[in-house]
Image (cartoon, rainbow, N blue to C red):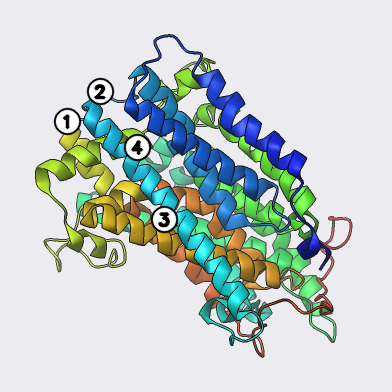
Amino acid sequence: MQDDARVRSVAAVFLWAVVLTLLLPGLILQSDGVRLTPALALQGVVVAHTGGALARVLTAPTVRFVAFGFWVFAYIWLGLAPLAMVATDTYPWPYRTSEQTTFEAVAVVELGLLAYSAGTALAARRRQDRAGTAPPGPLERVLSRRVAPWRLLTLCGLALAFTFLLISRQPSRLSAYFTSRQAISEAGAMENAQDAFLQVLLTWSLSVPAFWALLGLLRVPRAPAGDRWLRGVRWLLLPVLLALNAVVNNPISKPRFWVGTVLLTLLFSVPRLCRPRAFRATAAALIAALLVVFPYSDYFRYSDREDVSVVSLADQFTTNGDYDAFQQVLTGVDYAREHGFSPKDALGPPLFMVPRSLWPDKPRDTGIELARYAGYEFLNLSAPLWIESYLWAGPFAVAVVFCLLGAVGRRVDDVRHLLRDRPGTLAALLVPAFAFYQMVFLRGSLLGIAGPLTLLVAVPLLISTRTARATRFPAPAVPTAPIRHASIPGTGGHL
């Protein structure tokens, strides 16, 4: 309860606000050829909004994983990066738009941010109004589920068996995992192009269960009567699962966002790092890594690698295709002006499993459609949630989607905080995983990430069981006794 009683430090808020809203934007605007336009002025508002919100998250008296993931993405990909692009009229891809389109695109981004902030505020207000009176809702019941040992061991066995069967049928594929992402695609390529979806599903069916098997093995709660048998099984399975994840979830053959999700979720599964002070330090290091290291971390994407050239942050934002999110918003605004809105496209992500043979008019991947509209040969581009929702029904859809997203995100963070002293629950495991994978969700396209996201959420639900009853808001004054974990050999004690 000491964390709940704390308030933000004025000095910390001021320091973070200066760094995020003045220092870093100032470094970017030092570039030559800065153009003062209405769009640049509005983009300054976006930077101030995202930087201020991120400063509030970093100085909050409680840990808010979901809010942190959202505002980090918004600050870097839709705040700083577009600031450099709009200021110099320089973009990663050739497509260009008018000043009016640029202003409209910035307005769409800010509308989504305002709606997200409004949803967060409404959820926080509702929690205060209903504290201690409302019964546990669906989120409390889901996130209070605990990892079940027998289900977890079944997952471990299935992950190992599936990996053995799939890799053993393609002998060259094991070495490809340590070559490049391109080599993985070529090694697993299927003769029929229509089976590409199955190829992607098989790839993620290796990575996601292996990750959850390792995380669950580390954090499964200890039985009250002791679990000597479980400790023995862990002795055997832990090194095997570590080796398995080194193969299927290594930074050479998997996308950077996914590898970051795996590593950060494992890191924040340690209770000590989920305390506000430790979280702030780790979050600050993560922001620095995203700004400095991330642009160069795609070195292993292709088999033929180019020499790494270190350039300024502003040059990275305006020349690196990893920061195409805002330019895709620009392209999407022009696309909507020419083709109109399509509400039925919102059905594509939730119904991603339906094959096109049964649904000929199934929506196409938005990032690919925008790339084709712009005339690119390279089609593997992003489609941020801002433009995805805008193409459904314009500004109204953006406002609704982000208001709901803000409300749900705040509710998830609150439930995780409520259950923070109960390790082994989905609140301690699933919330950090979703919070960091949220960057992929926000970057899009939704149709492209629907499968991995479904696996990421479904697997922990399958290996967990419901508790006797979910806890109500607010947290009790006297915290319940934490559930002990079995010692993992070689970790120096409890994790």
Q: Nearer the viewer, mark 2 or mark 4?
A: 4
Mark 3 residue element = helix
Q: Nearer the viewer, mark 4 or mark 1?
A: 4
Residue drawn at point x = 51 percent, y = 50 percent? 70
Q: What label does residue 115 carry, if any? A: 3
Residue lying at the far right of the rendered structure: 492
Residue drawn at point x = 74 percent, y = 43 percent? 10
Residue with the mark numbered 4: 106
Residue with the mark numbered 1: 375
Q: Report the front residue among 33 and 292.
A: 33
Mark 1 residue element = loop
Residue with the mark numbered 2: 94
Is any atom of residue 194 visible in this view?
A: yes
Q: Are marks 1 and 2 in contact (CB under 8 Å)?
A: yes
Q: Are marks 3 and 4 in contact (CB under 8 Å)?
A: no
Q: Cα distance, mark 2 to mark 3?
A: 31 Å
Picture quadrant where residue 88 is located: top left
Label 4 crowd (10 A; few <14 / some 14-19 / many >=20): many
The residue under label 1 is which amino acid type? Gly
